[in-house]
Structures are given as C-alpha cells and as structure tokens.
C-alpha cells in the first residue's frame, strides 16, 4: 500500500506533486487573493442594485490547472476517516479481513451475527431490514460503497455524531422511527473512527482531492482558501493494510480527533469568518 498523503497538509505531499504545485504557485496565489478581494468588495457593495460582481480573471487558467492536477493525482493514496459504531468482534474482523462494501447481503450478515450474539432478536432484524434505505429508492445510491470523509472531524460534529450513536450505520437506522429499537442499537458496540488509506483510483473523487490539495498548498504560501473537505467512497473492497488505525471511544486519540489528532492538524474552518473579514463570528 502506497504511503498516503493528507490532502489538508502540504507537508505530506510527495516531491513530484509539490513540483507541480510550485509550478502553479503564482496562478494559485493570484486566483485566491483576487477571489478574496472580490468577496470583500461584494460585501461592501452587494446591497447596491446596480452592483455587478466582477469575475475573477484568473478563473479559466485556475480551472485548467485544477483539472490537470486532478488527472495527475489519480494514482495517489490519501488518508480518510470513517465514523461508525462497531462491536469488538467487528473490529477484529475488519482488522483481519479488510473493509467490505455495504450491501443488502452484508447488512443481513451483520444482523445475523448480532442475533447469534443475543444482541438483537429475529423480530428486530426483520424490522431493521424493512426500514432500511436498501429497501427503498436509495438501494443503488448506497449499495457496494464504503463512505468516508477527507478531513478529521471532532466527534461532536453534527455530521458525524449520529453515525456513532447507533450501531449498523445509516443503512440500519437512517429511517428507523421505533424509539425502543433505536435505544437498543445505541448500546450495541462502541463509537469508532477508522483511518483508511484510500487509493484515489478506486474513487470518483480525484477532482475533490485536487481542490483540497490546492487549498492546502495555497495556505502554505499565505492564501486563505476554504479547507476543501469532501465526502468520498470506494466501490471496491480494501485489504487489511488499508486500515491505518481504529480509534475507540475512551482512547485519547478518539477524544482528540480533529483537534489534537492527527498531530499538527488545524481545522481552518474554525474562525473562517474572522479570517475573511477581520470581524468576529
């Protein structure tokens, strides 16, 4: 498995990638600085009905560079994060066998395992299967995919906290309204964060990764772009060595996720408004 890069950290980029970014440094800086000036100008004059927002003269060249970068980084591996709730047995299975994709068949197997462990009844499993997004119009959207996020995020974040509150993932509880059954799912397993080495070639997110990489490089040369975080998925199973770490509730790295962990990570989305405008949020 190729050493993964962190799309938020220019210090993790390999020499060929850095060389490409340095070649585009003047363009990147000009684009982001102009974009910031236009933003401030619009804040001052946007209330005027006669105001017409100017276009960024560097946009066309910047988009062409972004597209080129997306093609160039397609053979890279990046680090991503999967927030979930798993039993100890499932952690052992993933560590041993790697990551398998979510599907109606895999959900049935997981439910059968919980029945065998005495954590769910047959009636519980039938109710969960009937209410699963797999049983509705999201079957194609959710089948044979394993979803992650590109940047580490604090565990209290509203986008990830629900994923760790109930066992089984969204395909199990997303549409479930039975309060008693949800309460049962909330005591199965423990909240976890899985760090995954993701080959970009097994995703459809090369352009999104290029956005984040350019943003990280831009910050390293003094620009203030958005952080460029994104959701991503793989459509093929990943081997055991793709699992970099599994952080469990109660461990220091779990509590520090998106704050002190990974070391050196800074969430540039915090304080973004003040950074852009000089004003307090």
Image: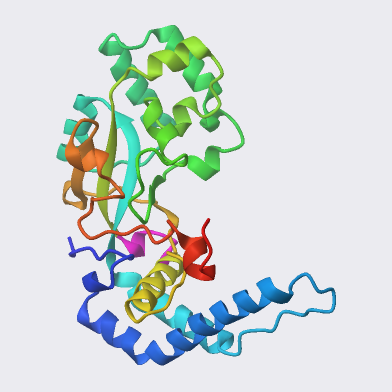
- Look at the image and tell me whether residue 125 can be seen: no
On screen, residue 73 versus residue 32, left or right, reads: left
State whether residue 178 is above or below residue 90: above
- Measuring 15% from the left and 38% from the top, which residue is drawn there? 96
Highlighted magenta segment, given as a residue range = 199-206
x, y (%) of residue 224? 44, 73
- Look at the image and tell me whether residue 95 can be seen: yes
On screen, residue 80 versus residue 123, left or right, reads: left
Q: How many marks?
A: 0
Q: Determine if the magenta segment contains residue 202.
A: yes
- Measuring 28% from the left and 67% from the top, which residue is drawn there? 9
Q: Quadrant of residue 266?
A: bottom left
On screen, residue 162 versus residue 117, left or right, reads: right
State whether residue 117 is above or below residue 7: above
Foreground: 140 or 252?
Answer: 252
Foreground: 72 or 83?
Answer: 83
Foreground: 140 or 13?
Answer: 13
x, y (%) of residue 125? 43, 15
């Amino acid at each position: 498995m190729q050493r993964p890069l962190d799309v938020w950290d220019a210090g993790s980029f390999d020499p060929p990638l850095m060389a490409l970014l340095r070649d585009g440094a003047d363009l990147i800086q000009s684009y982001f600085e102009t974009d910031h000036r236009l933003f401030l100008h619009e804040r001052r004059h946007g209330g005027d009905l006669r105001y017409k927002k100017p276009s960024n003269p560097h946009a066309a060249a910047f988009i062409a560079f972004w597209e080129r970068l997306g093609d160039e980084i397609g053979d890279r591996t990046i680090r991503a994060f999967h927030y979930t709730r798993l039993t100890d047995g499932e952690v052992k299975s993933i560590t041993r066998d790697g990551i398998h994709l979510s599907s109606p068949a895999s959900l049935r197997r997981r439910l059968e395992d919980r029945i065998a462990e005495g954590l769910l009844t047959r009636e519980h499993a039938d109710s969960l299967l009937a209410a699963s997004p797999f049983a509705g119009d999201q079957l194609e959207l959710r089948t044979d995919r394993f979803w992650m996020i590109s940047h580490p995020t604090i565990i209290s974040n509203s986008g990830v906290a629900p994923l760790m509150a109930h066992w089984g993932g969204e395909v199990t509880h997303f549409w479930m309204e039975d309060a008693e059954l949800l309460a049962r799912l909330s005591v199965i397993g423990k909240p976890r964060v899985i760090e995954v080495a993701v080959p970009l070639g097994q995703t459809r997110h090369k352009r999104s990764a290029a956005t984040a990489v350019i943003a990280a490089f831009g910050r390293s040369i003094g620009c203030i772009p958005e952080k460029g975080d994104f959701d991503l998925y793989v459509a093929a199973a990943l081997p055991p060595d793709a699992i970099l770490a599994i952080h469990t509730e109660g461990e220091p790295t779990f509590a520090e996720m998106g704050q002190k962990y990974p070391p050196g990570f800074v969430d540039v989305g915090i304080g973004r408004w003040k950074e852009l405008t000089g004003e307090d949020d």
